[in-house]
Image: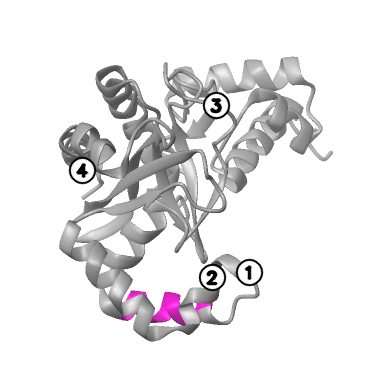
Amino acid sequence: MKPKPIRAFARGLAVLAALNRVGSASALTVATSTGVPRATVYRLLQTLVEEGYVGRGAADDQFHLRLKVRVLADGFEDEQWVTSVAAPALLALTERISWPCDLSTPDGTAMVIRETTHPVAPLSIDRNMVGQRLPMFASAAGLAYLSFVPSPDRAALLDLLSRSDDPNDALARDPSQVSQLVAATRRRGYGLRQAGQIWPHTGAIALPVRVERRIIGCVGAIWMARVVTSREGVARCLEPLRETRARIEQELTRRKPA
């Protein structure tokens, strides 16, 4: 006689698979994507949190996979556990500067916000930022990533961007301007944006985050452009941001499996 499948176990796997697809999500989002009742999803997520397979964002109540998932499958990606390290560091940074802060990672030809303090930052005017895609040329995080990745990776990324039909990627078809932009960003040591077409109300600064010489993402701070100039924003945020990046890099290196 064929044994009956364990429905609760199957639902738990569905929850893990859903988080693996999206990186981080609320209980409601997981319930919607899996078809599992929300109350059941919440109990499953709480169990997975207690067992150490899932973490819960302190700023936005989003759930995400943790490093322990690596013992289940080799396919677990770094960016899915970076958030568990970044969240407390970003919260501490926001408590220090009052402005919202983000951790973003590369996703194809854009950066994607994986962790943010927008919901809790005293001076934030945006809220639903997790999962937002940031164009490479129109965002501080994109400029920081593009400028500091190794040259072969930059060349490959620029080739993809040059074939994109997104107007935000059109600059990739002008190698001279790209070279000047990359050189200026590298001289500064950080990506910088003040207003712009997509987010005219804010300015931002971003630094690349490295683990073993590999850039895995960018950490940034955001201010209101109408009251803070780019010079003032850099003066207020750069050093605290550098310290936060160092904290994240040290913790990621310590946690990384041998």
**Sequence-wise first label, 3 or 4:** 3
Say few, some or many: other residues with alpha carbon within 10 Å of mark 4 (under 14 / 14 to 19 / 20 or more): many
User: In front here: 33 or 62?
Assistant: 62
Q: Please, what is the dominant secondary structure of the magenta stretch?
A: helix
- For image coordinates 21% across by 36% down, the residue present is 251
SS at mark 1? loop
User: In front here: 42 or 170?
Assistant: 170
- For image coordinates 29% across by 66% down, the residue present is 147
User: According to the image, what is the colour scheme of the structure?
Assistant: one colour
Where is residue 235? Give x, y as percent: 19, 37
Whether the residues at callouts 1 and 2 have beta carbons within 8 Å, the answer is yes
CA gap between label 1 and label 3 equals 29 Å
**Which corner quadrant of the image does residue 142 belong to?**
bottom left
CA gap between label 4 and label 2 equals 29 Å
Q: Which residues are magenta?
A: 152-161
CA gap between label 3 and label 4 equals 22 Å
Tell me: residue 82, above or below residue 189.
above
Residue at the spot of label 3: 62
User: In front here: 95 or 223?
Assistant: 223
Tell me, yes or no, whether the highlighted magenta stretch contains residue 111: no
218 displayed left or right of 15: left
CA gap between label 1 and label 2 equals 6 Å
Where is residue 192? Give x, y as percent: 32, 52
Is residue 74 something that shows in the picture?
A: no
Tag on residue 249? 4
Mark toward the viewer: 1 or 3 = 1
Residue at the spot of label 2: 169
